[in-house]
Amino acid sequence: MSKLNFGPLTGVKILDISTMIAAPFGATLLADLGAEVTKIELPGKGDTLRTVGPWKGKEALRWPGLARNKKSVTLDIRTTEGKAIFLKLIKNVDILIENFRPGTLEKWGLGYEELKKINPQLIMTRVSGYGQTGPYKEKAGFGTPGTAFSGHTAIQGFADRPPVSPSYSLLDYITGVYVAFATVSALYHRETTDEEGQEVEMGLYESIFRMLEFLVAEYDQNGVVRERSPGLAGHSSPAGTYETKDGKFVVLVCSTDSTFNRLAEAMQRTDMLEDPRYYTNAERLKHDQDVQVIVSNWIKGYTQKELTEKLDSFGVPVSPIYTIEDIFNDPQYKARENIVEVEHPRLGTIKVPGVVPKFSKTPGAIRHRAPELGEHNEEVLGGLGISAEELASLKERGVI
């Protein structure tokens, strides 16, 4: 009989003791690809994400998408009995994911040096606001302040208005991708070298800072402190948000000269390809204001649908600016199963993002809904040999 396969990480066991978004999202990505993830939550309270909006009545609507494919066990690892149970769990897992403030686990006697005595193969992935080292390591770290610290916020918005923070937890989600990437990299190293596990750590701000290499090079070599601006200012011309004849908006970008050539053909302005002010991206950037006027005026002659169809036919990168309602109705999202429906214990069902990326031989899947608090205590802790009577006693004393 063939072994059940839930994705490329089937058989990998993970303990997730993190809270909120960044590290838990990383654990969810790994769970989507088949890893068995057990989430440890504080008895009676659970992950603070359970109380974060948006809501429908008293139901937190973010939880179903962010905690799917996980089992929930309540355990207070600060207590003597809770710590002992936690160490038993550690013996049988490949990976521990945590995001306490640096030094917290060490204070409880649960730092990596102690845990690897129990399980030398353990990989411990750690996320904190500013990393495990440096003068800011003990600062409280959340996504929006971390985004400001990274340099990202300073370049967002318009020059005549205050800088703009992302309207959702962008930094946390990007960090979650790094968490998944780093964890499987450490796992690959362990599996291919027969060596012990290792500790992997990063600060929230570092994930988005890594994507700002152009800022680093520009300041280092040219002494330029880039100011806030909308769109891809200083990168490509034309690029930006444009209004169509019917009062809707599109985003268009010509990051290469070949894409601008196609745009010029679509606009019937091939004369611009011979004009020394416009025939290369470098020259267009020098005359960007003129380029923007030409392109904006042309776009205003078409509805959003007409424009998109026309530019698609010429191979010009363009997209209507979608609302979530547009996304729900779009055939591409349907064809890719980017939105799927899952069970919910009180709402009946709820729609959540689908699993990405897609694997041809070992596709990931949403195997089960997000767990209720402590839903898997009996299954997981009972598997350690703890009897029903002991579990009841531990619950009464607030250990689980």
Image (tube, rainbow, N blue to C red):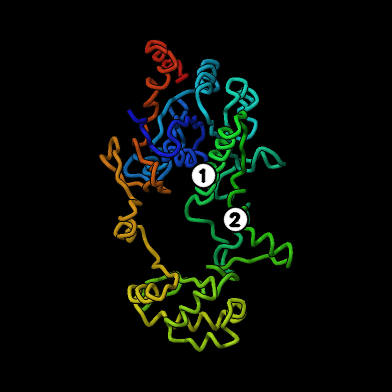
Q: Position of residue 52 (x, y in %)?
A: 43, 42
Residue in view at x 56 percent, y 44 percent:
142
Give above or below for 202 relative to 298.
Answer: above
Give above or below for 16 relative to 361.
Answer: above
> Mark 2 and mark 1: span between their CA atoms?
15 Å
Residue in view at x 45 percent, y 70 percent:
317
Can you tell which mark lies on residue 176?
A: 1
Q: Position of residue 338 (x, y in %)?
A: 35, 52
Q: Mark 2 is on which residue type?
A: Met
Give above or below for 15 relative to 185.
Answer: above
Compared across the picture, whether 81 is left or right of 244 comes to: right
**Which image quadrant is residue 199 in?**
top right
Q: Mark 1 is on which residue type?
A: Gly
Residue in view at x 55 percent, y 88 percent:
274
Q: Nearer the viewer, residue 214 or 135?
A: 214
Q: Residues within 10 Å of mark 2 (few under 14, many from 20)?
A: few
Q: Which residue is mark 2?
A: 211
Camera sees residue 51: no
**Lower sequence index among marks 2 and 1:** 1
